[in-house]
Image (cartoon, grey):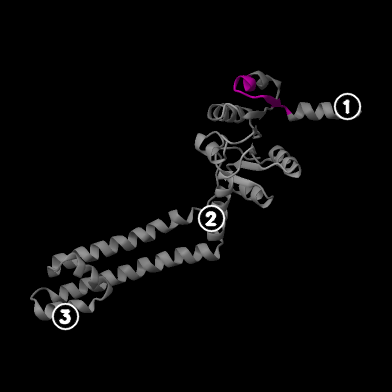
Amino acid sequence: MSRPGDGVGTDRPLVARALPPAAAFLGVAAAGAAGFVVLAGVGPVEATFWLLDPTGIELHFERHAGPERLTKAYAVVVTVGLVLSSLWAGETVLSAAFGGQIARELSLARDRRRIMDTEDHVIVCGYGMFGRSVARRLAEADREVVVVESDGDESERARRDGHLVVTGDARRESVLREAGVDRARTTVAAVDDSNVNIQVAIAASQLSPGVRLFVRVGDETYESLARRAGADEVVIPEVMSARSIADDI
């Protein structure tokens, strides 16, 4: 069962993946233009135009003296650099498109917009067995649920189950804000770690003093600590299960 702070998946966002090839392309272009200015003594605008149309170099040296051969050789190097960086950028975009990353990121963007418009919802922190059960019961009762889960695979599972999802550590204020804790009716700290759940309760109660807090703990020794952290209800699944069984006997 995952807990906040674990890995959030190996896929880097498309923007982060696209930055290196884009920076490489811009770097080659800037270096190329600067080199033309130094070698041929032309202005920045003309030097930039040579990146698009290197034939202008020959026309320039028909009217001006200077290192024509060196400038042409430099132009070849710059062109190769621009082509390679363009291919790198294209490969990044195509791999993202055919690998489904673009579709995933569009889906994440839609989720973020929906969460921003959501009020009076329940935030379930942790999508292990306990968190899944809580989220499923709430969804069956037509309650809007936002799941906060740090593990990428569990986040995708929650999304497939039809829930709005924020991937991140629920102990972080920025993550709880993204989940809309200030607009939520209830926050359920459902991670399989009592200490983590208590930290989640502290963060949530500070960000939204009016939110109702359900905190899962492993045993009764944590109950008083959880209540001091702001818990309105403390849930001990093992105790509840034992009572349920005893009541049915």
Which residue is under mark 1? 247
Q: Give the range drawn in magenta.
A: 225-236
Label 3 sits on a secondary structure element that is helix
Q: Residue at x 56, y 53 (%)?
A: 110
Q: Quadrant of residue 25?
A: bottom left
Outermost residue toward the right in this view: 249
Relative to 19, 111 lies left or right: right
Which residue is under mark 2? 105
* In the image, residue 234 lies in the stretch drawn in magenta: yes
Looking at the image, tell me whether mark 2 or mark 3 is earlier in sequence order: 3
Say what amino acid the circle numbered 2 marks.
Glu
Looking at the image, tell me whether mark 3 or mark 1 is earlier in sequence order: 3
Q: Residues within 10 Å of mark 1 (few under 14, many from 20)?
A: few
Label 1 sits on a secondary structure element that is helix
Q: Residues within 10 Å of mark 2 (few under 14, many from 20)?
A: some
Looking at the image, tell me whether mark 1 or mark 2 is earlier in sequence order: 2
Relative to 245, 20 lies left or right: left
Outermost residue toward the left in this view: 65
Label 2 sits on a secondary structure element that is helix
